[in-house]
Image (cartoon, grey):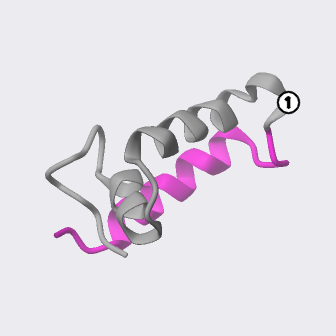
Amino acid sequence: MHRNTHDKVLGGVLSGLGDAIGLSATLLRVLFLLAFFGIGGITLGISSGAMTLLYVVFWIFTPSR
């Protein structure tokens, strides 16, 4: 996995994840926002603060490409 610095909104984490698993970065961004705000009951038991921390950790430790 890598951070995609050419197709990024913040750090390129979700774009790189999309490249790695073969999904659209836009789809992953929408799913992330839905889970972040808990819209439609999609909270997965993860708080928005924990999701933010997880995103920042991936941003720091995932190499860019």
Query: Could you say which quadrant of the image residue 13 lies in?
Result: bottom left
For residue 61, side relative to residue 36 (left or right): left
Residue 34 is situated, as x and y percent measured from the top left of the image, at 65, 31
Q: Is residue 61 magenta?
A: yes
* Total labels drawn: 1
Residue 19 sits in quarter: bottom left
> Residue 30: image x %, image y %?
53, 33
- Specify whether residue 23 is painted magenta: no
Q: Residue at x 21, y 47 (%)?
A: 7
Q: If the image is split into quadrants, where does the N terminus sit?
A: bottom left
Q: Secondary structure at mark 1?
A: helix
Residue at figure coordinates x 26%, y 74% from the top left:
63
Kindly identify which residue carries mark 1: 41
Counting from the top left corner in percent of width and height, residue 16 is at 34, 62
Q: Main secondary structure of the magenta part?
A: helix
**23 with respect to 9 (left or right):** right
Residue at the (64%, 35%) spot, across then down: 36
Quadrant in which the C terminus appears: bottom left
Pointer 1 local density, CA inside 10 Å: few below 14, some 14–19, many at least 20 = few
Q: Is residue 10 above or below residue 64?
A: above
- Position of residue 46 relative to residue 43, above or below, is below
Along the viewing direction, whichever of 30 and 47 lies nearer the viewer: 30
Three-letter residue code for mark 1: Gly
Which portion, as a residue range, is magenta? Answer: 43-65
At x 66%, y 50%, the residue is 50
Residue 35, percent from left and from top:
68, 37
Judging depth in this view, the residue of 21 and 44 nearest the camera is 21
